[in-house]
Image (spheres, grey):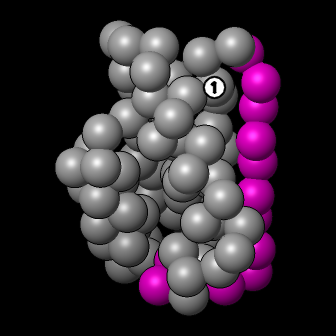
Amino acid sequence: MCGLICLISKNNTGFTEQELNIFKLGLYATAVRGTDSTGVFLVTSDGNLQLIKDTTQSSDFIRTKEYTELESNAYTSGKILVGH
């Protein structure tokens, strides 16, 4: 069974750097619940959905280009961020 982590923002201006760092650490920590795969989805303030997943551990997942791009979008316009 995988672990889950979620951030929800009251603002429409995205998440702070500190919030995104906490999310990244939480995503890394959920690896103790399962290392088969990692996935993240982001809902932006305008209602768009961005989803990425891979059959890799979270420690490798957070270093991918796709995660970096998602994190950038979360910083500027993130509303909900969920990972496993």
Residue 35 in sight in this render: no
Is 34 left, or right, of 51 in this rendering? Answer: left
Is 8 left, or right, of 60 in this rendering? Answer: left
Is 11 above or below relative to 72? above
Residue picked out by circle 1: 44
Q: Position of residue 67 (x, y in %)?
A: 63, 65
Q: Say what amino acid the circle numbered 1 marks.
A: Thr
Q: Quadrant of the C terminus?
A: bottom right
Is 2 left, or right, of 56 in this rendering? Answer: left
User: For the point 38% across and 73% down, which residue is it?
Assistant: 28
Is 83 left, or right, of 55 in this rendering? Answer: left
User: For the point 30% across and 39% down, which residue is it?
Assistant: 16
Is 43 above or below relative to 32? above
Is 70 above or below relative to 31? above
Q: Position of residue 68 (x, y in %)?
A: 59, 66
User: For the point 64% across and 53% down, which residue is it?
Assistant: 70
Over which residues does the magenta segment extend?
47-59
Residue 3 in sight in this render: yes
